[in-house]
Amino acid sequence: SYGVSHPNVVRAYEYIRAGAIVAYTMEFVGGGDLADKLSKPGNYLPISECVRLLSQMCSGVQAIHDAGIVHRDLKPENILLTAQGDIKP
């Protein structure tokens, strides 16, 4: 995923393998995740905001699919939000 550069995709920097430990480093995305946003009491999203977020999500997922990658764990906890409220699945 290192070659994927899209505003709605979290940038991956480095893949690390040390014995049984496997990890990677990625871009810091400081706005929390979609699950947190949706779980706040009384936080109902207007239809226009839902459409905006879903459009960004689809755009990001299309970019990674175009690179031959399948996101196998797409859920609100894995959809990050920037400080400006944009989506990065």
Image (cartoon, rainbow, N blue to C red):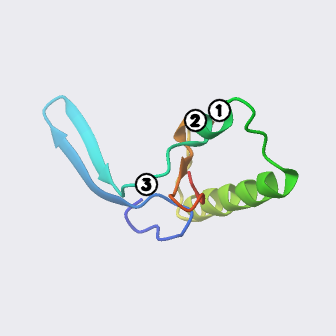
Residue 62 placed where, x, y %?
65, 61
Q: Residues within 10 Å of mark 2 (few under 14, many from 20)?
A: few
- Contact between marks 2 and 1 (CB within 8 A): the answer is yes
Disc 3, SS: loop
Disc 1, SS: loop
Q: Residue 16, relative to residue 57: is it above or below?
A: above
The residue carrying mark 3 is 29
Q: CA distance from mark 2 to mark 1?
A: 7 Å
Q: Is residue 82 left or right of residue 74?
A: left
Viewer-side residue, 30 vs 87? 30
Which of disc 2 and disc 3 is earlier in sequence? 3
Q: Residue furthest left?
A: 19
Q: How many marks?
A: 3
The residue carrying mark 1 is 40
Residue 66 placed where, x, y %?
59, 65
Disc number placed over residue 36 in the picture, else none: 2
Q: Residue 16, relative to residue 20: is it above or below?
A: below
Q: Amino acid at mark 2?
A: Asp
Viewer-side residue, 10 vs 53? 53
Q: Amino acid at mark 1?
A: Lys
Residue 57 visible to the viewer: yes
Viewer-side residue, 51 vs 10? 51
* Residue positioned 65% across, 30% down in the render: 39
